[in-house]
Amino acid sequence: MATGVYTPSIHITETFHLRDSIAIYGGFAGTETILEERDWIANPTVLSGDIDGNDITDPDGVVTTTINIIGNNSSNVVTGHNITHTAVLDGFIITAGKGGGGQSIGYCQSCGGGMYNEMSSPTLTNLTFRGNLAVVGGAMYNTNSSHPSLTDVSFDSNRAVERGGAVYNKSNSNPTLTDVAFTFNTVGGFMPGAGGGMYNQNSSPSLINVVFAHNTSGMNNAASSPVLNEVIFDSNSGRGMTNVANSTPSLTNVRFYHQTGRGMQTLIATQC
């Protein structure tokens, strides 16, 4: 797809559906002759939930903070339902999702403003999720055994009203994240264990070379056992990591710097 801004349609329930055996690539200027010539940084290709066309954006059409979302927006900008790793999304900015509308067409409209995955394991590469909003999982919501693979992905300035400012993993959803950054993601009302970066509930993702910085709390684990290798928690408000409900994370070369609360805390509680 060529550089530009693309919206699903004019109704909040409309979404970009990923499909098996279909790879979608962004970052083209329109003059390339082979895939390798594209440049997704120089040629930003934006999937936006701004269906009214009235959000406040940067020159590329990207909402840089959720307070600039105005009026009606797509509840889930991108959706995966019962898809495998053969569904590929590569080289896009996903922005301006506004998940807050309850349940419709089989999907939780309050979950995953940027992307909603159910029973799905898409391959996600060279993506930026910025300025997305939802009740839970501001940028991404993975549920019911969804195991997406994320490589070279950034989550910046997304917000959830309750939990998982950037990502919420639920019900045995175990994504793999490699070279991923979580920055300036927030949760409303700020609870230290609400997972401004990531909230895991009965889910155990694998993280390799991941950074959580300047989020309102880094990661919360509830009945979850994530595996972290070469992960940095830096300057997050509250705790870097909170573990409840018998969560047992595996940590290798994990570092905590400059948290305003404790680096990691394990609590005897059912949920936080």
Image (tube, helix red, strand yellow):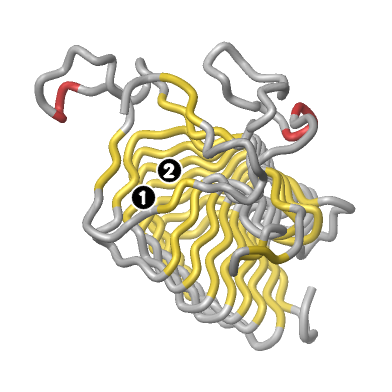
Query: If the image is split into quadrants, where does the C terminus sit?
Result: bottom right
In this view, the residue farthest toward the front is 10
Question: What residue would you read off at disc 2?
Answer: 153
Q: What element carries label 2?
A: strand
The residue carrying pointer 1 sits among few (fewer than 14), some (14 to 19) or many (20 or more) residues within 10 Å by Cα, namely: many
Q: In this view, does 170 lie above or below 113?
A: below
Left or right of 67 in this view: 11: left
Asked whether the residues under the numbered discs 2 and 1 touch, taking CB atoms below 8 Å apart as contact, a structural biologist would say: yes
Callout 1 secondary element: strand
Does residue 130 appear anywhere in the picture? no
Q: Where is residue 232 in the image (x, y as percent from the top left)?
A: 52, 50
Q: Can residue 34 be seen in this view?
A: yes
Residue nearest the observer in this picture, 220 or 83: 83
Distance between mark 2 and mark 1 Cα atoms: 8 Å
Identify the amino acid type marked 1: Leu
Q: Which residue is drawn at 43% across and 20% down?
A: 4
- Residue at figure coordinates x 28%, y 36% from the top left: 25
**Where is the N terminus found, in terms of image quarters?**
top left
Q: Where is residue 246 in the image (x, y as percent from the top left)?
A: 65, 88
Residue at which label 1 appears:
124
Comparing labels 2 and 1, the label whose residue is closer to the camera: 1
Q: Residue 17 carries which label?
A: none
Mark 2 or mark 1: whose residue is earlier in sequence: 1
User: Is residue 33 depicted above or below 83 in this figure?
Assistant: above
In this rendering, would 157 be left or right of 271?
left
Tell me residue 207's x, y (percent): 43, 61
